[in-house]
Amino acid sequence: MSIPLLSLLKAPSPKYITDLIDQFFFARLEASSISNKSQIIKELEINEPKFYELQVSVYDLINDSLYYNLKSPEKIEKQLFPQKFHGKLRSLLSKHISTSLEKWNKLCKSKYLTLPKLISFDWRVDVKSASDLTSTLSAPVVLLEMKVQEPPEFVGLMPKIKTVNVELTKERLQTMLDGLVRINEQLLSVSNK
């Protein structure tokens, strides 16, 4: 990983390097190609195979930093770079990674599919006054309204809030409550370990 990164030493400025790392991150996140590849090749004075080696090395660096969640530049330098790696470049990359890590984590998490999340719920007890069956007429029911946040369809879009209404009889409500008690007990037993 470290040898292709040394081609960054030919960069015109430290800002160019950090911008390039960000550009590689977004290309990795969106699974897209680098649009200004030929310009980068020219500015770093490398050929196309060396560019791809650099790209893979930067991807590896980003992946490792996200996987190990290294938040301080010192930990990044120690864990991701060999001891003999160029000092100033190692320091610049480590500082940039540590300052970008939180943003990168959030962007990666928002990119992946998630399950819907319960935002709020409201309920009321009602008496059923109309039914096809006379046995369910005048039976009390619980009307449960849940607001659920759907996963975002695309990165950067606000997720949709969906309203789900459920009618529960006394028996179905009891079954649901029993299930929720078992879930709570399992959560408590896992968190106590």
Image: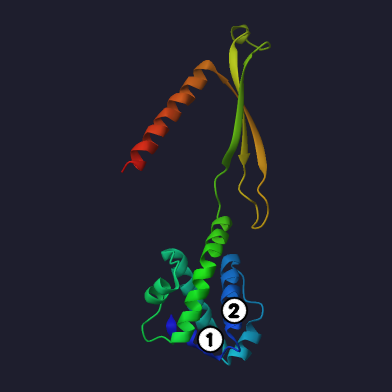
Q: Nearer the viewer, residue 29 or 101?
A: 101
Q: Nearer the viewer, residue 174 or 184?
A: 184
> Which residue sits at x=50%, y=80%?
92
Quarter occupied by the N terminus: bottom left
The three-letter code of the residue at mark 2 reads Leu
Q: Please report contact status of discs 2 and 1: CB closer than 8 Å, yes or no.
A: yes
Where 154 falls versus 54 (above or below)? above
Where 128 falls versus 61 (above or below)? above
- Tag 1 residue: 8
Where 162 falls versus 53 (above or below)? above
Residue 73 located left or right of residue 131: left
Asked whether residue 79 appears in the rendered view, the answer is: yes
Residue 163 located left or right of residue 72: right
Quarter occupied by the C terminus: top left
- Tag 2 residue: 20
Within-10-Å neighbours for mark 1: few <14, some 14–19, many 20+: some
